[in-house]
Amino acid sequence: MLLRRIHDDSLSQAAYLVGCPSSREAIVFDCARDVDRALKTAEQAGLLIVAAADTHVHADFVSGLRELVERHGVHGYLSREGTMPAWASACPGSTTAVGDGDEIRIGGVRVRVLHTPGHTRESLSFELVDAEGAVRAILTGDFLFAGEVGRPDLGARSGDRHELERNARELQQALRRLADMPDEVRILPGHTAGSLCGRSICALPQSSLRIERQINGSLRAAGDDGAFLDKVLRGLPDPPAYFVRVKRRNLEGASGELRLPDRLDAERFKHAAAEPANVVIDCRAWSRFCEGFLPGSISAPLDRHFANAAGSYLEQGDGVLLVCEEHELEKAVRILFRVGIDEFAGWTTPAEFDAIPEEAFDADGIEEIGATEAHRRWSSGAAFIDVRLCGEFEAGHLPDAIYAPFSQLPHRLAELPKDRELIAYCRSGGRSARACAYLKRRGYRVSNLRGGYWPWAGRGLPVQSGAPADRSQC
Ligand SMILES: [Fe+2]
């Protein structure tokens, strides 16, 4: 059996290509919508992708399953435990619904389906079995990660404790099904460290049941009814706002090819940015952004927060204008495409951007202020916004700070006062910088606390601890 892992560093997501060395046919699991990457990987391995399957309806990236089926003649396998999307029902000969115990054969490769609900109801895992039927590896999707299990809250209605507990119980039952499997079984998870589909995933690219039985606290707690719920429902970080849009998109099925946008000169970029339907995603460093930016721009340097910030602050249908270096363009477009952003109105380089006359820039800009100045403004009525994760907030936050994680802001605007100055902060000033630009775009008066929480706390200025008011615990 040939196995290739296709890893997306920006989303900490893994797709897998499994091929038969004799027939040279392959199946791809959890392929993102820029399917050219998987097709190229297969070609380089001398394989032809004839089948594709998703472990579940993803919330964090748009799947390429529909694109593979409709435009590349690939047979699609979907979970029988979920609702069959309209596009799949429309091409019955090209798709098959599969469920627990079913087997998929690709040449000499045998793949057995295991229903592993909990993260979502329809979640499937795929066992790679040998000629004797023994399980060698399991593609676990968002069911089991290295050191963690899939969070059970993403498929539940917000605040519905009953649904949350039911999902957690299903997850527990599914984990118990692994008990009889040998230690040697390899675990090929759908995510690595950094993904928000699990609370704290380890940095291992893959694992084994032996390792998981030693390090995975949630798997170990699966035998204990009382401990398990607490283990998997506590400390879940708020998911980025874009998860809602992507989940909806995957339920419909997305199609369409990735195309790079046109390069614009300074004049054309300035005009395009003035169109209400367009939004500038400015990938320059925050220090350069603060020197001058076009009104309404979103600040999103191409680092590990890019997908969560740009993906959450954009709406489907926004015409994206990118400011980035030429070597960053394809990466930025691919990430946005994967989180469901399809419309690109153009791009330009930072050097070309500098040719835009200053009169076109945002007149007020965004201020960076130090701890002493922030304290003075807070004493005069300004409000703090903490844009970190819940656990960070609980450990210590600035006085009366409003809890609003940076990638959740579009869902929390109603909680933010427009009649007061806001001072955003995070751990070091990076996430809050993105939040500042977004809030400015939304019409708030906002400054960024330079250096974040620690310069404030280090000066002995007042801090508080405890969970946010709308969360009993983090
Ligand atoms: Fe995921």
Image: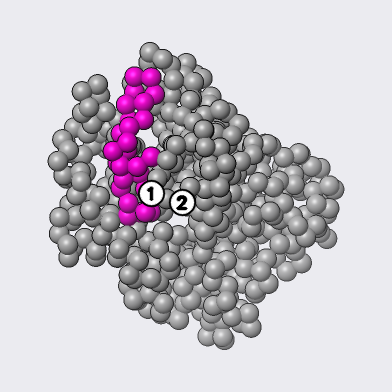
Magenta stretch holds residue 121: yes
Up the image or down, 4 lies above or below 244; here it is above
Q: Is residue 184 left or right of residue 144?
A: left
Q: Is residue 196 or residue 300 the one in the foreground? A: 196
For the rendered model, the colour scheme is one colour
Q: How many marks?
A: 2
The label on residue 81 is 1
The quadrant in which residue 361 appears is bottom right
Mark 2: secondary structure: loop
For the residue carrying disc 2, how many other residues have a C-alpha within 10 Å: few (<14), some (14-19), or many (20+)?
few
The region drawn magenta spans 98-125
Ligand 1 within 8 Å of disc 1? The answer is: no
Kindly identify the amino acid type of the residue bearing the numbered disc 2.
Thr
Mark 1: secondary structure: loop
Up the image or down, 341 lies above or below 93; here it is below
Q: Is residue 463 visible?
A: no
Residue depicted at x 37% and y 15%: 21
For the residue carrying disc 1, how many other residues have a C-alpha within 10 Å: few (<14), some (14-19), or many (20+)?
some
- Give coordinates of residue 410: x percent, y percent: 57, 66
- Give coordinates of residue 122: x percent, y percent: 38, 50
- Give coordinates of residue 316: x percent, y percent: 64, 54
The label on residue 471 is none
* Residue furthest out toward the top: 22
Magenta stretch holds residue 24: no
Up the image or down, 332 lies above or below 383; here it is above
Q: Is residue 109 left or right of residue 262?
A: left
Up the image or down, 131 lies above or below 473; here it is above
Residue depicted at x 72% and y 51%: 319
Q: Is residue 255 or residue 196 the one in the foreground? A: 255
Quadrant into which the C terminus falls: bottom left
Quote the CA–CA distance across marks 1 and 2: 7 Å
Residue depicted at x 56% and y 85%: 381
